[in-house]
Image (spheres, rainbow, N blue to C red):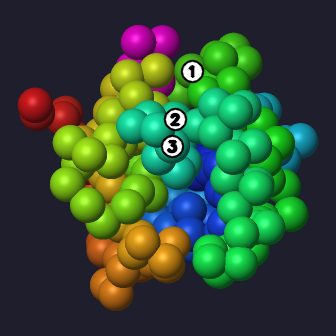
Amino acid sequence: MNIVVVFESMFGNTRQVAAAIAEGLAPSGTVASFTVNDAGAKDAAESADLLVVGGPTHVHGMSRPASREEARNWVNDPAKTVTLEPTAPGTGVREWIDGLGAMPALCAAFDTRMDIARILSGAASGHIEHELTKRGSRAVLPAASFLVTKETVLEDGELARAREWGASMGEAAGLPMHH
């Protein structure tokens, strides 16, 4: 199976989660990972059997240009100990999905979000999954959120959980998903 993981990352947490998911998926096929700003991401995604897309949760959903600019400004706030990814802010998952032509048959969506009640934080993954499935792809697992602390550090155990989610996705890719 040809598997492509595409992600948007501002501070590195989503990149770490994407890498852990790719590790979990490795036994299921050939896995390639890209940021939404990588030149080859779109072509790779359009020819994949399974497309996994993830990004940070901004203002209850997928990032927008204004929320990415706001995140960029956090780097200048001494109270926040964050470092911007080299490709940030760049393109977001929303814009990247809008530019996709061919859609892989199977998909999965994930996000990173603050470790607070989901009703307060929202979750980009549900929006990502909706955008992928309305274009004809089928989700192999329910969308997943991986949690970061208020200091924007991944919670303990989240990378292991991401690897497990990737492994279970690989197993589920051949099975119909039940809602």
Instruction: Look at the image and tell me whether residue 27 can be seen.
Output: no
Examine the image and state in which quarter residue 96 appears: top right
Give the residue number, with chain letter if any, for mark 1.
Answer: 103
**The label number, if any, that marks residue 58 in the structure image:** 3
Q: Are marks 3 and 2 in contact (CB under 8 Å)?
A: yes
Q: Which residues are magenta?
A: 132-136
The residue lying toward the viewer, choosing from 84 and 17, is: 84
Residue 162: where, in percent of width, then height?
A: 38, 69
Residue 8: where, in percent of width, then height?
A: 65, 49
Residue 125: where, in percent of width, then height?
A: 39, 41
Give the residue number, with chain letter if any, for mark 2.
Answer: 62
Q: Nearer the viewer, mark 3 or mark 2?
A: 3
Mark 1 closeness class: few <14, some 14–19, many ≥20 residues within 10 Å? many
> Most prominent secondary structure in the magenta stretch?
loop
Taking the magenta stretch, the answer to whether it contains residue 25 is: no
The residues bearing labels 1 and 3 have C-alpha atoms spaced at a distance of: 25 Å
User: What amino acid type is highlighted by mark number 2?
Assistant: Met
